[in-house]
Amino acid sequence: MIEPTGKTIRANGLLHRVWTWEPESPRPGTILCAHGFLDVGRSFHWTAARLAAHGHRVVAFDWRGHGESQWLPEGAYYYFFDYVADLADLVPQVATRPLTLLGHSMGGTASALFAGSHPELVDRLVLVEGLGPEAPEGLPGPDHVRRWVDSVREARERRLRPMASIEEAAEKLLVRNSDLPPDRARRLAAWSVREVEDGYVWSFDPVHRTKGPYPFRPEVFLEFLRALSMPVLLVEGERGYRTRDHEERVAALGPARRLQIPGAGHMLHWTAPEALAEAIERFASE
């Protein structure tokens, strides 16, 4: 199985960790993978390596504040449209055309926002469980903003309780993903933690766990879905994530192809990488 090579590049003013699965005789173009919330780019490994074995050049990266990419300084915050600006700077540095942009979960939402606003840069779009989060009921008010300010302050001041070992981190992944093979869980854990003085902590910025001051607005997101002019593949797990208005979001994609992977949950690239790679291979090769 092809292993990736890593490098760090500056994009949109921040250092981003980038991983590339390079076949011996690559086809034209790049498949660029955008991971989801609290995940890392290397978690696409089992899907990416299979695609690389078919001649596809595959690239994945860690979003800002995730994995080995740079955290924001105190006083800054993570907003969805910042990810769009990051992609606008990353794409020309790491990808060649034709570009297949693949986004999982939060990465799918960001990829749809990018492809809708920059359609001339994306030749194909794959959304893996990536049609956005559930919209909160009602609009934010003073109490919401006060809680946000307090939660960010607490996240920055709280001392994280370290895990004693990589194995403990892997066990935590298995608790939330019972269909994940243990050997795969250990590799994921090793890629997803950083070592501290008395153990290991997750590598993402704890501020990500706070709820931002601006709620997700489905009516805005729908405009981006309707603006997608390139071929789109929507891949869902049979037991995956669905919002109350999921079918309305699917309908906004127009003639997009839709594939459901039997028995799979939300983390398709972790637990069903073979089926996911097969679906992407067919789509990217047309």
Image (cartoon, rainbow, N blue to C red):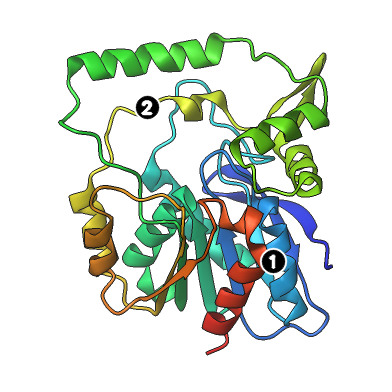
Residue at 29% x, 65% y: name it. 250
Q: Residue 209 — which label?
A: none
Q: Is residue 190 left or right of residue 214?
A: right
Instruction: Write down the quadrant of residue 135 in the picture.
Output: top left
**Amino acid at dot 1:** Ala
Task: Name the one closer to the observer, 74 or 183.
Answer: 183
Count of all numbered marks drawn on residues in the image: 2
Say what secondary structure mark 1 lies in: helix
Residue at 23% x, 44% y: name it. 217
Question: How many neighbours does mark 2 have within 10 angstroms: few (below 14), some (14-19), or many (20 or more)?
Answer: some
**Amino acid at dot 2:** Lys
- Residue lying farthest front? 263
Position of 48 relative to 169 (above/below): below
- Mark yes or no: residue 98 visible: no
Question: How many neighbours does mark 1 have within 10 angstroms: few (below 14), some (14-19), or many (20 or more)?
Answer: many
Reading the image, the residue beneath label 1 is 48
Residue 113 percent across, percent down from the top left: 35, 58
Q: Is residue 120 left or right of residue 144?
A: right
Instruction: Write down the quadrant of residue 64 in the picture.
Output: top right
Reading the image, the residue beneath label 2 is 211
Residue 62 percent across, percent down from the top left: 62, 47
Nearer the N terminus, badge 1 or badge 2?
1
Residue at 66% x, 40% y: name it. 67
Position of 48 relative to 56 (above/below): above
Residue 77 percent across, percent down from the top left: 43, 29
Quarter of the figure with the N terminus = bottom right
- Mark yes or no: residue 162 visible: yes
Residue 246 percent across, percent down from the top left: 28, 55
Say what secondary structure mark 2 lies in: loop
Residue at 69% x, 74% y: name it. 51
- Measured in 3D between alpha carbons, the distance from the residue under mark 1 to the one under mark 2, in whole angstroms, is 31 Å
Instruction: Write down the quadrant of residue 148 in the picture.
Output: top left
